[in-house]
Image: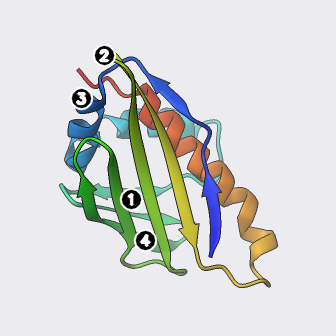
C-alpha cells in the first residue's frame, strides 16, 4: 500500500460542525461551484460528479470512480473505500479540535499501486489529496 497524506488544514469551525457537514456527503454539493472555477486553471479535475449521502462518483481521465463511506467515527474520522476504482484504495478524513471554535483536518489516501505504476501515479495522487484537503478547509461549515 502506498500512503499519501495532505498537510494539516485549519478550519475556523468546531470539530462537530466539520464532522456533521462531511458525514453526509450530499452537504458537499456547494463544492461543485468551486470545482467549476478550478477547471479553468487546473488539469485532470474530476468530471460528471454525482454526490449522494454516502458516496461520490466521478470520472477522471475517462475512468469512472465511486468512493463510499464505510465507517463514521463520530466527530473524529470518516473512512471511505473505492467501490469502482482502477486500483484498491481507502481514504480517511480525520478531524481534530484545536479550540472550542476551531478544528483541523487531514486527508489520507492508501492505495494499492504496483511498482510499475507508482512513478506515474504518485505525484497526481499527492496533489489530489492536497486539493481535497484544501477544498474541505474552504467549505462554510456553519
Closer to the N terminus: mark 1 or mark 4? 1
Task: Name the secondary structure under disc 3.
Answer: helix
Contact, CB < 8 Å: mark 2 with mark 3? no
CA–CA distance in space, label 3 to label 4 = 28 Å
Mark toward the viewer: 1 or 3: 3
Instruction: Bin the neighbour count of mark 3 within 10 Å (Cα to Cα): few under 14, some 14-19, many 20 and up.
Output: some
Identify the residue shown where x is 81% and y is 71%: 119
Mark toward the viewer: 3 or 4: 3
Task: Name the secondary structure under disc 1.
Answer: strand
CA–CA distance in space, label 2 to label 3 = 11 Å
The percent position of residue 55, horizontal first and vertical second, equals 27, 62
Identify the residue shown where x is 49% and y is 56%: 46
Label number found at residue 100:
2
Closer to the N terminus: mark 1 or mark 3? 3
CA–CA distance in space, label 4 to label 2 = 37 Å
Label number found at residue 65:
4
- The residue that mark 3 highlights is 17
- The residue that mark 1 highlights is 48
The percent position of residue 130, horizontal first and vertical second, equals 60, 44
Identify the residue shown where x is 64% and y is 36%: 41
Amino acid at each position: 500500500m502506498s500512503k499519501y497524506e495532505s498537510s494539516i488544514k485549519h478550519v475556523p469551525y468546531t470539530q462537530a460542525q466539520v464532522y456533521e457537514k462531511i458525514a453526509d456527503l450530499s452537504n458537499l454539493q456547494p463544492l461543485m461551484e468551486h470545482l467549476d472555477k478550478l477547471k479553468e486553471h487546473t488539469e485532470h479535475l474530476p468530471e460528471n460528479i454525482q454526490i449522494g449521502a454516502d458516496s461520490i462518483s466521478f470520472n477522471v481521465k475517462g475512468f469512472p470512480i465511486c468512493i463510499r463511506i464505510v465507517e463514521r467515527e463520530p466527530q473524529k474520522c470518516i473512512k471511505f473505500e473505492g467501490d469502482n476504482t482502477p486500483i484498491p484504495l481507502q481514504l480517511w478524513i480525520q478531524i481534530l479540535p484545536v479550540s472550542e471554535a476551531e478544528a483541523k483536518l487531514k486527508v489520507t489516501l492508501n492505495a494499492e499501486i504496483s511498482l510499475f505504476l507508482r512513478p506515474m501515479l504518485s505525484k497526481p495522487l499527492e496533489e489530489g489529496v492536497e486539493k481535497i484537503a484544501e477544498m474541505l478547509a474552504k467549505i462554510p461549515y456553519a
